[in-house]
Image (tube, coloured by chain):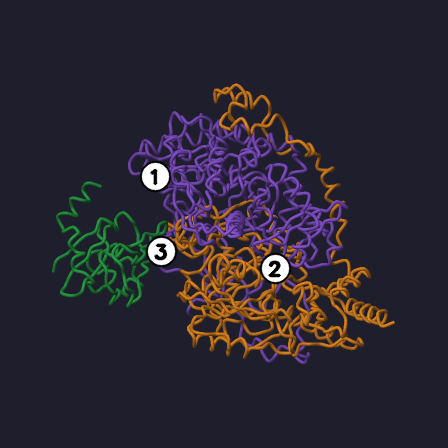
């Protein structure tokens, strides 16, 4: 596959590399395989499926809009396809390959039973608009999952349709907006801590709220007094991440919730870090009104190179009537109902004894079924006892890392008490102009995926390490050894780190060039 | 041709009834490699201190504020193809836009060359 | 527990290193009121792989599997054959267990795939640039409306009556909160869409016109006059496509002047999955609109040794940098579904996609011709691709669909399900036919439909 072809692609490693080592003819080196672009190896006339030839005489009812021009697609046969993607896959780091301590992302092992269950035809090969009597199994999965989510969070209702965490945030904020508008209360401001994930302010702005920052204490927590002072009749909601993005539990959350409620507002909790407390703490006990749960974080559905996620939102009693349609509910006779626009009012009156005033629909269909199946499989595997152990091991691993490095690396909140499931470090002691980026790239050469870098923004050169509970002690000890060595080099100002990584499929990439002259699509080379 | 500076690191050259605006050498150095500049369209009416343009590096986007009030009369189209001009020549070829001067009095609150240098030295 | 590697010995040693007496010491910041005295009650304890599998299989058995019966549902989700190798590729751990390519040096697999995916989508849609995916077609549709308001600095969107009602609902829901004005209506029951009526609703305040192609009733219309009318008023044309296979047979929206083309990619590689996860596709015809696009974009560059490589680029549009000024709040998108789409599209290629489209259309024509022979059934459409609307004379289609289901036939989507309460639509049934449909399936649907109609007449 690596011979030059007529599209103009040719091997790119023609010269000796920096070490002067011998080069190969192909640009490949044993298991280090280069792979051209699909469009450089495929052809318009090649296909990997066997379909009937087109009959030019066949009737056409396409309204006179037949596509005559070439589309610009190319195909490969099946063996070539499998090889193309397999070779590409080998240029990727994944949890299956090694330790992936990407803070705030909960890169835990993805159990393969989840994958197997999600592919059962009774879940995978079912159309979302089939008559409800023919999709009872799928609806039961949604209902069982909803039951777990409510019990684990101590909340009253759950909206299943949000497609990922940010979509869930939007669901929560829109529920809050709808509840406020229902009582004729036009509020304009959402308060967000400076350390919050970018989706928080983006979501609030999307829902037409003005975003104001709330400051943190030097100990890395929400400044309760400053927050209380800012509350008032214009504040619709406070968005709080708990455990927060600095890796700490917000001990004042109950008091914050009470103060927000007293001022007529609502509390949105960003559930990105639920893995630290699952099975041990129920956010409902802390006065939260809405919280999204990233099934792809806490409940092990795969991250897939950037999704799909799933972000069900648990809601308090006050917000439940406003949740988006459709939703599922089980009635006393054991039947699972899918409640869409037309039944919503009647169903609420009959079964909830009240009015339903949903804010509307956030997506076509019912949510990320494929993720529901995987998450439920995971919950059933762990059980209530196992999930509690998940939180405990995740927190134990993070504290172990924090205490194994704090003597060497700047750990801004090490004195604030135990961390939760993430350990946070900064680069302020690095010498010679070295920064977090350099250490992270050095981490790649050591065979690890780097931690989250430069987030949260409140710590200079932040390095947020989230080991999760699915790492062994041996794996974590190896990581600590490598991290210590890299930190020592960075503090000593070892310039060689500035060119790392040396051993990855690519050296540092020129992001400035990419952004100045964006090339976002393959174009055939000029003849 | 007097040049004034703001504490948000914009410079403004005044020439009769018209002024030219850009960002300072100090600002471009802080931002790093500039990859894109979003300029106001001609005819936009700016309020002093309000958003006028956006300057972007790979990992950051910064607002550029109007040093004074007035109407945009011309933009530096060269920046569209070559945003790097802001790095290589921030206070000359890398200018952002020209504008009318709504209220000459607004210039009085701005810094002169010396004042800005002292301001930056203290940062 | 099979997913937890720490042993009690490990835990003891680690607590000692930390200087904690017990695990509870690490949770001291949890206030008293929220401390639990043990595992949460009312939930089961851990279970073996075998036990979990047994439970899930029991649930799965309670649904009617589309592939087991004659199946004719569409309306935004289509059942196509997905080659076996697609699933093999997406289950490779390097793709499945990676995340957003924040560290491009060790994520070239995902990045190059995204670059190829963006090219496939852009070419399919006849556009200059496509992004790296959004959640699904309906949210992509809203993002297109939001983008059009940013580009035009106007805030009125005109939605075609023949836009998928779920998509309209999503747009209307979001618009309630953003303050954008939406004009829409349910479709009229006629052979051709009411383009003149749609065009008459475009005015100087209009940011965009949103048209589905083929539309919710399966009709195919020339978009060029609508594009022209929109552009005359300084509005953008947003075209929504819910069946990408159709674009192997009919002109691309881009070549007819659409400014933003969005759609559902589920048909290619993803599968039905009861509605999700699906794949939002998003593309623009004019490259100058790129900086107003939502979501991630992958771009080509070089590394420090001059080798070609790929990175996420133009990130300053996104929430992690621009926060409240971002073009969208989206973060995680549909990466693995994009991979499935791309692998399936690679297997098809231009030749395969055209053949697949032709086969869908051929079978749909056969089905339409057969169904109109059933007394009391008529075909609404003049044009269609693989989905069309039939009218059941004097019968509510919704009840017919349920009765068909009782007879083991999943016979289509009734417009009554999609538009409850809109009287004139209650007798209409949407029928989708793909390469997975057999002539026997078509015959079964026709005979069962005829039997039902006769039964009722007696």
Q: CA distance from mark 1 to mark 2?
A: 43 Å
How dense is the environment of label 1, judged by Cα within 10 Å: few (below 14), some, or many (20 and up)? many
- Which residue is farthest right? C458
Which residue is drawn at the image coordinates 35% and 38% (left, top)? A460
Which residue is drawn at the image coordinates 59% and 37% (left, top)? A153
Locate residue C276, reporting x and y percent: 62, 54
Asked if the residue at tag 1 contacts the one at tag 3, i.e. Cβ–Cβ closer than 8 Å, the answer is no
Count of labels in the image? 3
Q: Secondary structure at mark 3?
A: helix
- Chain letter of mark 2 equals C
Front residue (pair C267, C454): C454
- On the same chain, marks 3 and 2? The answer is no
Residue that badge 3 annotates = A513
Any part of residue A90 in sight: no
Q: CA distance from mark 3 to mark 1?
A: 21 Å
Q: Secondary structure at mark 2?
A: loop
Chain shown green: that is: B
Residue that badge 2 annotates = C266
A174 vs B112, left or right, is right
Which picture quadrant has residue A345? bottom right
Which residue is drawn at the image coordinates 74% and 77% (left, top)? C378
Residue that badge 1 annotates = A435
Tell me if residue C195 comes above or below residue A252 in the rendering.
below
Tell me if residue C425 comes above or below residue A491 in the rendering.
below
């Amino acid at each position: 596959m690596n011979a030059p072809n007529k599209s103009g692609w040719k091997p790119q490693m023609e010269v000796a590399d920096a070490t002067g080592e011998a080069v190969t003819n192909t640009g490949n080196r044993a298991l280090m395989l280069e792979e051209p672009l699909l469009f450089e190896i495929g052809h318009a006339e090649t296909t990997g499926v066997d379909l009937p030839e087109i009959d030019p005489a066949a009737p056409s009812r396409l309204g006179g809009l037949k596509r005559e021009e070439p589309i610009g697609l190319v195909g490969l046969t099946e063996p070539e396809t499998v090889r193309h993607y397999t070779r590409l896959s080998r240029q990727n780091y994944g949890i299956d390959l090694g330790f992936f301590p990407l803070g705030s992302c909960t890169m835990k092992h993805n159990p393969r039973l989840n994958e197997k269950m999600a592919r059962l035809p009774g879940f995978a090969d079912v159309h979302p608009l089939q008559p409800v009597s023919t999709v009872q199994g799928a609806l039961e999965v949604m209902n069982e999952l909803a039951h777990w989510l409510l019990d684990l969070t101590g909340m009253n209702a759950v909206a299943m349709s949000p497609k990922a965490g940010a979509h869930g945030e939007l669901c929560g904020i829109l529920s809050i907006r709808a509840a406020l508008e229902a009582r004729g209360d036009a509020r304009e401001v959402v308060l967000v801590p400076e350390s919050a994930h970018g989706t928080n302010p983006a979501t609030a702005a999307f829902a037409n709220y003005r975003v104001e920052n709330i400051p943190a204490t030097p100990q890395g927590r929400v400044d309760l007094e400053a927050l209380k002072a800012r509350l008032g009749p214009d504040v619709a909601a406070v968005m709080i991440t708990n455990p927060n993005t600095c890796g700490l539990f917000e001990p004042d959350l109950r008091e914050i919730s009470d103060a927000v409620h007293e001022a007529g507002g609502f509390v949105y909790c960003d559930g990105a870090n639920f893995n630290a407390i699952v099975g041990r703490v129920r956010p409902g006990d802390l006065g939260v009104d809405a919280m999204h749960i990233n099934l792809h974080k806490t409940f092990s559905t795969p991250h897939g190179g950037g999704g799909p996620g799933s972000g069900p939102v648990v809601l308090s009693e006050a917000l439940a009537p406003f949740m988006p349609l459709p939703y599922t509910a089980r009635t006393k006779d054991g039947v699972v109902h899918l409640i869409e626009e037309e039944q919503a009012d009647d169903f609420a009156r009959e079964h909830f004894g009240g009015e339903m005033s949903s804010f509307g629909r956030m997506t076509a269909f019912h949510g990320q079924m494929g993720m529901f199946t995987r998450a439920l499989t995971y919950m059933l595997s762990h059980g209530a006892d196992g999930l509690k152990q998940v939180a405990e091991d995740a927190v134990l691993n993070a504290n172990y890392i924090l205490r194994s490095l704090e003597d060497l690396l700047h750990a801004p909140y090490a004195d604030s008490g135990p961390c939760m499931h993430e350990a946070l470090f900064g680069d302020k002691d690095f010498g010679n102009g070295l920064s977090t980026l350099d250490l992270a790239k050095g981490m790649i050469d050591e065979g690890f995926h780097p931690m989250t870098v430069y987030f949260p923004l409140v710590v200079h050169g932040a390095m947020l390490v989230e080991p999760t509970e699915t790492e062994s002690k041996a794996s974590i000890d190896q990581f600590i050894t490598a991290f210590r060595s890299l930190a020592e080099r960075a503090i000593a100002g070892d310039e060689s780190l500035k060119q790392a990584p040396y051993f990855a499929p690519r050296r540092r990439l020129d992001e400035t060039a990419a952004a100045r002259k964006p090339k976002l699509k393959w174009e055939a080379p000029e003849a | 041709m007097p040049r004034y500076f703001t504490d948000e690191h914009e410079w403004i050259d005044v020439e009769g009834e018209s002024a030219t605006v850009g960002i300072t050498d100090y600002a471009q150095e802080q931002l790093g490699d500039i990859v894109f500049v979003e300029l106001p369209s001609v005819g936009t009416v700016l309020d002093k201190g309000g958003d006028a343009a956006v300057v972007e590096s790979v990992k950051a986007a910064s607002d550029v504020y109007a040093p004074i009030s007035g109407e945009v009369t011309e933009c530096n189209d060269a920046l569209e193809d070559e945003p790097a001009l802001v790095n290589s020549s921030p206070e000359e070829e890398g200018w952002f836009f020209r504008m009318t001067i709504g209220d000459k009095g607004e210039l009085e609150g701005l810094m002169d060359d010396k004042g800005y240098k002292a301001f930056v030295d203290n940062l | 527990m099979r997913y937890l590697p720490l042993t009690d010995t490990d835990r003891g040693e680690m607590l000692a290193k930390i200087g904690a007496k017990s695990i509870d010491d690490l949770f001291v910041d949890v206030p008293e009121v929220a401390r639990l005295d043990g595992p949460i009650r009312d939930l089961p304890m851990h279970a073996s792989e075998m036990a979990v599998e047994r439970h899930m299989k029991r649930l799965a058995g309670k649904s009617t599997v589309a592939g087991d019966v004659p199946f004719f549902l569409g309306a935004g989700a289509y059942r196509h054959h997905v080659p076996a190798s697609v699933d093999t590729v997406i289950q490779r751990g390097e793709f499945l267990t990676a995340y957003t390519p924040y560290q491009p040096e060790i994520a070239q697999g995902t990045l190059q795939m995204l670059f190829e995916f963006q090219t496939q989508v852009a070419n399919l849609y006849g556009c200059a640039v496509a992004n790296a995916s959004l959640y699904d077609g309906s949210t992509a549709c809203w993002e297109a409306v939001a983008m059009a308001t940013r580009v035009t600095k106007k805030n009125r969107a005109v939605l075609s009556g023949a836009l998928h009602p779920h998509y309209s609902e999503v747009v209307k829901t979001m618009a309630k909160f953003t303050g954008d004005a939406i004009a829409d209506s349910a479709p009229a029951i006629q052979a051709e869409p009411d383009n003149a009526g749609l065009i008459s609703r475009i005015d100087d305040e209009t940011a965009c016109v949103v048209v589905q192609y083929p539309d919710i009733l399966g009709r195919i219309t020339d978009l060029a006059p609508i594009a022209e009318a929109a552009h005359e008023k300084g509005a953008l044309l947003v075209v929504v496509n819910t069946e990408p296979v159709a674009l192997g047979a009919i002109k691309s929206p881009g070549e007819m002047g659409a400014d933003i083309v969005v759609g559902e990619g589920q048909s290619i590689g993803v599968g039905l999955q009861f509605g999700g996860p699906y794949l939002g596709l998003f593309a623009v015809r004019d490259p100058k609109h790129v900086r107003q696009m939502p979501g991630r974009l992958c771009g080509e560059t070089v590394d420090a040794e001059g080798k070609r490589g790929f990175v996420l680029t133009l990130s300053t549009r996104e929430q992690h940098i621009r926060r409240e000024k971002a073009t969208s709040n989206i973060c995680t998108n549909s990466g693995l579904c994009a991979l499935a789409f791309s692998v399936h599209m690679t297997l098809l290629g231009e030749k395969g996609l055209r053949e697949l489209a032709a086969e869908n259309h051929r079978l749909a024509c056969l089905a339409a011709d057969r169904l109109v022979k059933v007394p009391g059934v008529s075909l609404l459409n003049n044009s269609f691709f693989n989905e069309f609307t039939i009218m059941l004379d004097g019968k509510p289609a919704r009840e017919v669909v349920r009765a068909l289901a009782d007879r083991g036939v999943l016979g289509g989507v009734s417009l009554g399900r999609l538009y409850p309460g809109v009287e004139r639509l209650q007798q209409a049934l949407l029928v989708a036919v793909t390469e997975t449909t057999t002539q026997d399936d078509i015959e079964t649907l026709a005979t069962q439909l005829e039997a039902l109609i006769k039964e009722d007449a007696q």
